[in-house]
Image: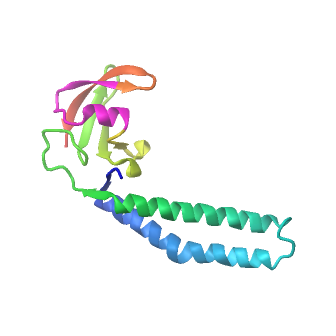
Amino acid sequence: MPTNFLTREGFQKLQDELEYLRSVKRQEVANRLHEAMEGGELIENAEYEAAKNEQAFVEGRIQELEIILASARVIEESRKADIVQVGSTVTIQEDGSKPEKYTIVGAAEANPRAGRISNESPIGRAILNHRAGDEVQVEAPGGMYKVRIVKIG
């Protein structure tokens, strides 16, 4: 099972979601199913089908979160500010573009719009273990391009 890198905040957020799904959402879905079953013909009951689909989604998400949390490794803010690693906040710049600031996180927490990119993404993978000032080649689905690591930290 691959390691899932999570920040302390991300780990807590996923634990909270898992607890909510187990304790609140499961019960809500069970109540909807019960009410739908009392609604007559199950074969033609759209509410019953919707509740069954929601139940499958909730149970699938619970399993997914259990797997992520079981293989989680909590990362701390990077103390070694000279090399890019998971947990580092990095400013990079592509030729002709303005600098962009990202925090390198595990795939479970990635949200590029919020400035959090995965260590498994093309950029994340390319800049890992490099230093400020390095120019690295990024191998992306749309082709190769270069970025310069402006600052770490």
The structure residue drawn at horizontal position 24% and vertical position 36%, both measured from the top left corner, is: 128
* Applied colour scheme: rainbow
Question: In the rendered view, does 51 fall on the left or right side of 89?
Answer: right
Residue 118: x and y in percent read 35, 43
Question: In the rendered view, does 18 fall on the left or right side of 55?
Answer: left
Residue 110: x and y in percent read 39, 47
Up-down relation of residue 78 to residue 47 (above or below): above
Q: Quadrant of residue 121?
A: top left
Considering the image in quadrants, where does the C terminus appear?
top left
Can residue 126 be found in the magenta stretch? Answer: yes
Q: Total of numbered circles in the picture?
A: 0
Can residue 2 be found in the magenta stretch? Answer: no
Q: Is residue 13 visible?
A: yes
The structure residue drawn at horizontal position 46% and vertical position 68%, both measured from the top left corner, is: 18
Up-down relation of residue 81 to residue 49 (above or below): above
Q: Residue lying furthest front in this view?
A: 1
The structure residue drawn at horizontal position 23% and vertical position 30%, both measured from the top left corner, is: 149
Most foreground residue, 53 or 90: 53
Residue 59: x and y in percent read 56, 65
User: What stretch of residues is rendered in magenta?
Assistant: 121-138
Residue 143: x and y in percent read 42, 20
Most foreground residue, 3 or 94: 3
Q: Quadrant of residue 38?
A: bottom right
Q: Is residue 100 visible?
A: no
